[in-house]
Amino acid sequence: MRKIILSVAVAAMALSTAASALEDIKVNGQAKLWYETNDKASNSLFNRDGASGEVVFKLGMTGKQGNVGFGTTIYQTSSMGLEGNAINAYRTDVTNGDMFVGEAYVTAPMGSMTSLKLGKQELNTPYLFTETWNALPNTFNAAVVTVKPVADLSLVAMYVGQDSTDNGAYPNAKWKSDGNVDEPLFGGSEVFGALYKSSAFDVNAWYTHISNALGTNTGAAATGYTGGTKVNTYWIDAGTKIADINLRAYATMFDADILPDTTKAFALSAGTKVGDFDLFAAGSTVSKKGDHDVANISTGGKKSSLPTEGVYTDGMYVAQNDSTAVKLKVSTKVGSTGIALQGVNNTSDKVNTTGYSDYVNGAKSYETTEFDLFLTDKFGDFSTTAILMHRSFKDDATDDKAGGFYARFIVALNF
């Protein structure tokens, strides 16, 4: 008994000594319910056949010891046993009972102007980025070096080794079902960025190189892409304020050596405030040539960095070849409730027949219109979001299959 007590005491002292050496320990967390239902095709609202849902518990910690910092985030997921009752029992995009590490990284200075962040982390670049729209975000194994030679300029160099999303036929999946990080799209990418921001204007320029892309095209399964495909992407966006209007311009190119043409895209956006209302308008166009989207490579092109995206009219539409999109949005606040209404229209002469769409098989018309109503509020410690969407398609067959009313509800308890 004495040996056991002594061992416990020694372990407690060792833990106390280690903990006292750490600084700035911060803990954060969230419990979140994510639920969506729709009445598309033969579904009816709140019927289990067209519904998906998930409860996610998140716990994060950051701290440092001397100059070396660290960050970790773990997730615990659960369907709460509602498959076949409140949600579809056969949904592939719902994890259940998995616990895994979302982030695990260290940070360290490399001189007076340079810092390193190494490990599993969230990224924000135009072609490789973390999507937060779903119940769980995707993360990357990466090494990121940031240099700040002057106050207004940041230079970024990163090696991105792997990501954690489930690609292939289900780009909408919330997470890989096993929670592991693998390399479904690329065997290593180099990303370089130059970010300048002053009081007058800001400019962001990015270059991404993938030397061993594995089916980065959304039609990979259909076109039979193989490993070894080299991809180069170029991105620049710049913004300024004229009078009370925030203006921004975007230009990007996607070039793959297996494709005969380079895909190009351009976009403009403008935003201003009139009284209690925030107004926003954007337009984008993608070239016919290139046969590739200009969207998030790590999620099979689900989301993009273009300013014309809606909720479902996202990278799978506005970032596709030969697409022209327009977005209008107005938002305000009534009491404690945030209200935003937006409309997105995307037109194209093409029809996607690769199967990478809201449903796995069959054609999808790129010509679509979407209206979204966002309602956000906070009740005590609970934050709530409701997104009500209506989608319609020019193609009757697609409209019958994917058009209709969608509702998404998110309730989160943050601490």
Image (spheres, rainbow, N blue to C red):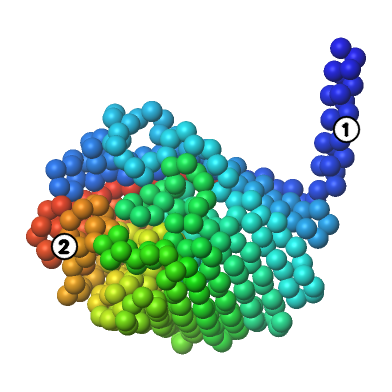
**What residue is rendered at 53% in x and 38% in y?**
99
Q: Is residue 142 above or below residue 4?
A: below
Q: Is residue 85 above or below residue 248?
A: above
Q: How crowded is mark 1: few (under 14 residues within 10 Å), some or many (20 or more)?
A: few
**What residue is rendered at 56% in x and 72% in y?**
190
Which image quarter is the C terminus in?
A: top right
Q: Quadrant of residue 96?
A: top left
**What residue is rendered at 77% in x and 67% in y?**
109
Residue 102 position in % (x across, y down): 56, 48
Given residues 34 and 8, the one toward you in this image is 8
In what element is the residue under mark 2? strand
The residue beneath circle 1 is 13
Residue 333 shows in the view:
no
What amino acid is found at the position of numbered circle 2 in the picture? Answer: Phe
Q: How crowded is mark 2: few (under 14 residues within 10 Å), some or many (20 or more)?
A: many
Given residues 173 and 53, the one toward you in this image is 173
Farthest residue to the top: give it: 1
The residue beneath circle 2 is 393
Given residues 291 and 123, the one toward you in this image is 291
Residue 270 position in % (x across, y down): 39, 79
In what element is the residue under mark 1? helix
What amino acid is found at the position of numbered circle 1 in the picture? Answer: Met
Residue 332 left/right relative to 391: right
Residue 103 position in % (x across, y down): 60, 51
First in residue order: circle 1 vs circle 2: 1
